[in-house]
Image: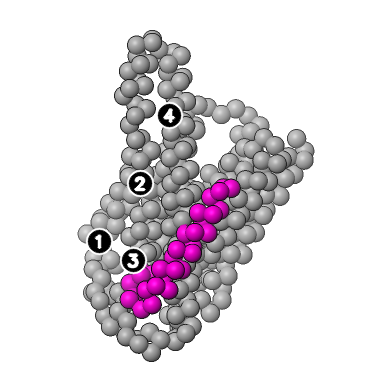
Amino acid sequence: MEPLLGVKLTCLFALLALTLVCGLIPVCFKWFQIHAATGRHRRVLSLLGCGSAGVFLGAGLMHMTAEALEAIESEIQKFLVQNQTANERNSSEIADSAQVDYPYGELILSLGFFLVFLLESLLSQCCPKMTGPPTVQEGEWNGGHTFELHSHGPLPSPSQSPLGALILLLSLSFHSVFEGLAVGLQPTVAATLQLCLAVLAHKGLVVFGVGLRLVQIGTALRWAVFSILALALMSPLGVAIGLAVAEGGSEGGQGLAQAVLEGVAAGTFLYVTFLEILPRELASPEAPLAKWSCVAAGFAFMAFIALWA
């Protein structure tokens, strides 16, 4: 037990350090501020943003969604097996035919998607100045003409954190807790190291993309640092919870609740990825093939990491 505990504690600090370093790099260096960039510098930052959008797309589809669907299906099957042993045979047959074939995982993902959609709609209804409809306005980028998205109302100040960034942080925080929980629950040293390395391989790029996103939307430095710090603490928190659960017992309904929360988080992440991040990065028609290549490269990397994660 002592070597296993030492490995898990090492993984805890490794997850914390990697998240802090990768998340704070774009926040603390002015080179990543796209609003102050011009010419080739601005073009490179735009393509870097497209690469991070591809990473978000791959993380949402290949990791968060896949893991959530698998966990929900597994927990529902466990729940049905427990009911079959407690109930009569005829009732278990009804449960098999009525519940197993229904796409509960996809339903939970959709609930997360529509939850953020509802929050965006309520915010647009109550505070239209913060989420005014986008208009196309011509500007200059790298010596040529481009089209940028602007709001009819005044742009939100850095203190007014956009809802999309907040939802992105919350969904990634949920996912990070579950990743850390999985690491903390591993029964052997080899399994713990393998899972931790797989998490580290994709977590660095994802958190770097989060930091870059916070910088691009104009988040104040202290709030950006606080957001990265809070996100960095989520995986170690999950590892600590996993260590505590491994020492004691776990209830059967606890796994199902965890799977449902992970599914909702995956649904919110998909909303932010498809309706917030990708449209913003692809708003300008400049260099469309280069942007497509960066998005595809980011997605391909996350798909490759999914072989081990």
Magenta span of residues: 280-309
Decide which of 106, 23 is in the foreground and name it. Answer: 106
Where 163 sits versus 308, above or below?
below
Q: Main secondary structure of the magenta part?
A: helix
| Separation (CA) of disc 2 from disc 1 | 19 Å
Query: Amino acid under label 3?
Result: Pro
* N-term-proximal mark, 4 vs 3: 4
Q: How would you rate the neighbour count of disc 3 (Cα within 10 Å): few for under 14, some for 14-19, many for 20 or more?
A: some
- Give the quadrant of residue 77: top left
| Separation (CA) of disc 4 from disc 3 | 35 Å
| Separation (CA) of disc 1 from disc 4 | 37 Å
What residue did someone put label 4 on? 76
What residue did someone put label 1 on? 124
Q: How would you rate the neighbour count of disc 1 (Cα within 10 Å): few for under 14, some for 14-19, many for 20 or more?
A: some
What residue did someone put label 2 on? 112
Name the image quarter holding the N terminus: top right
- Residue 230 visible in image: no
Query: Amino acid under label 1?
Result: Ser
Residue at horizontal 39%, vertical 44%?
264
Residue at horizontal 33%, vertical 49%?
113
**2 and 1 marks in contact (CB < 8 Å):** no
Q: Is residue 136 left or right of residue 231?
A: left
Secondary structure under badge 2?
Answer: helix
What residue did someone put label 3 on? 279
Q: Position of residue 121 (x, y in %)?
A: 25, 56
Residue 295 is one of the magenta-drawn residues: yes
| Separation (CA) of disc 1 from disc 3 | 18 Å
Secondary structure under badge 1?
Answer: helix
